[in-house]
Amino acid sequence: MSYFVVLTLTGVAAGMIYSALALALVLIWRATRVVNFSQGAMAMTTTYIALAVIQATGNYWFGFIAALAAGLVMGAVAERAIVRWVEKGPPLNAVIVTLGLLLVLEAVVPMIGGAQIRAFPAPFSIAATAVGSTFIALSPFNIFTIAVVLLVMVALLVLFRFTSLGLRMRAAAFAPEIARLLGVRVGRLLTFGWSLATMAGALAGLLVAPTLLLYPNNMDAVLVYGFTAAVLGGLDSPVGALVGGLSIGLALSYIGGYFGGDLETAGVLVILIAILMIWPKGLFVHAAERRV
Amino acid sequence: MLGSLSAFRPTLIRHSILGLGFLLAAGLAVWWVDSFNQFLVYELSSVCYFAIAAAGLTVLTGLNGQLSLGHGALMGIGAYTTAVLLKDHTDLNPGLVMAAATLVTAGASVIVGAAAARLRGPYLAGATLGLAVGLPGVAVRFSNVFGGDTGLSVPALSAPDALSSVPPVVWLVWVGLVPTVITFVLLANLVRTRYGRDFRAIREDEVASALYGIRVARTQVLAFVLSGACAGLAGSLLGYTANVAAPGSFPLTLSLLLLAAIVIGGLGTLPGAVWGALIIVFAPDWISSLSDAAHLPIAMQGQLPLALFGAVFVVAMLAFPHGIQGGLVRLWRLRAGRRTDGASEGAAGT
């Protein structure tokens, strides 16, 4: 029983990270109807930037902020310079472009930062904590992870629901032509959406690196998990991203705990295909027709 | 297929004669090249399996409009089938082994294809991405069958006694050329039958195709199975060429390289698959000899081909969505001033 509890708690902590990456994918999908397959590679890149800043300044939080800022800039540049030109075309073109970005980032980062596996510092201990005589499976870093992802989720919710900027962003995503007629700067808001999303991805990169270590394709599997989470949630809903991320985190933890770690990814694949067979558009879909 | 048999028979004969001629010419050319550049010959066997896999992916992605990021993993199924079959019976006929690998992979593709036919756009890409990332883990988990991280070895091919003067490398390429030519002849025919037209119709408009009487889901599964069978055959050949089937040989990058091949070559054209295969096999050599000449650090040299492929993805989609074959066809039309029908079809997923 206690093993089950341990698996559950670690699953929740990991699930929050997948939620953050899923959230990044969902934000971009909502804004531009593009799945950004380079999301993981972008997060890896910002984490390398964080590591460089941490090593230069000796302070974790400078690196943390640098990574988020780098995410903001990288998302804006990617959307404005590259994705803008394929957004209107066939979906396959956009997919291939983001895959190209993935290849470029995963090849260029090791050219500059080296391909070897590196340790990445955590601001809090990653060892399980003891409260009195009982061990809690959650480390202080796990608790930090859960808190910071929840904080970001709430901040985004407030932004989208209760601010004028959020309203304009939703308008730009759902009815770009009408929004444009009403004076919304649609192009800029789409760029901003990519910025926010890449920042959420950068957060996932920072949170996953202390346990997963840092190397050029350390985010490949996380991208698959995050994507699975986003698809579970219907790709359109931030709440769906959170629920999907937690489900995937728990599923991975149980599969890894009871059947062996090598089967984790294959297990997720089976879950993904099974769920898509039953609900081809995910669990949290609003009434939205597929564009023919 | 019986109904359209009479319609494609002349094409089949023409393609078969062309294929046979190419096979003889290429086979002799390889033997000649072997006398001065053995490494080049070895790389030609890589071209063979990349061309087969890229041709399969062309049918799926270029003609039918279904994206697969999992064809590298399907090649893995082919390679592992080959290795497992040869583990106890090292002298099995390579033709039989390749046929078995093709069938096993086609069988696996039925399952993936059935799921894929329900999925669209990003959902399909995500499911096949999961295949590419998840399948190597299965090989590691069941290490008593699949040899774990180190994988299984595949015995090297050698020519039969009657042809003992043929060097093993040349024999390897000959063994690779035969299935390559067969695959291309069969696919070139398929493209011109009702099935090929159905594939393209579905790519253009699923609803209209369904109204026209095409069974959309069934045709999509068929395209996936055909494409998967090609990947299995290519994987088997990869096993013979690399002499090993290991999880590390089938990373996500392999699937992306295949996609690169068909995008660079020209999405939706079979000759484009050959151009793409040639480029992904030989471009890394050219790039590394260029970077040697430019005295780039070692750390950069290994990564440069991938970075350039990635850049090509982006630039190709922004500027040249028709690839090499599209460019060649346009040049040919400009020169000859005549119309070659069908060759420039298949702008990315239109």
Image (cartoon, rainbow, N blue to C red):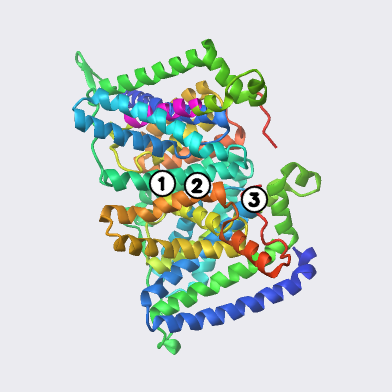
Q: How far from the left and from the top, in percent, is residue B101?
A: 51, 63
Which residue is found at the position 60% from the left and 37% from the top?
A277
Crowdedness near tag 1: few (<14), some (14–19) or many (≥20) residues, C-alpha within 10 Å: many
Viewer-nearest of labels 1 and 3? 1
Tag 1 residue: A104
Distance from Cα at disc 1 to Cα at disc 3: 32 Å
User: Magenta region: which residues?
Assistant: A192-207
Q: For mark 2, what is the residue?
A: B314
Report, in whole angstroms, how far the alpha carbon at label 1 lies from the one at label 2: 9 Å
**Disc assigned to residue B221:** 3
**Could you tell me which residue is drawn at 31 percent across and 24 percent down?**
A65
Horizontally, is A8 left or right of A58 in the view?
A: right
Within 10 Å of disc 3 (Cα), the crowding (few <14, some 14-19, many 20+) is: many
Residue B68 horizontal/vertical position (percent): 55, 49
Numbered disc total: 3
Q: Is mark 3 on a helix, strand or loop?
A: helix
A47 relative to B3, above or below: above
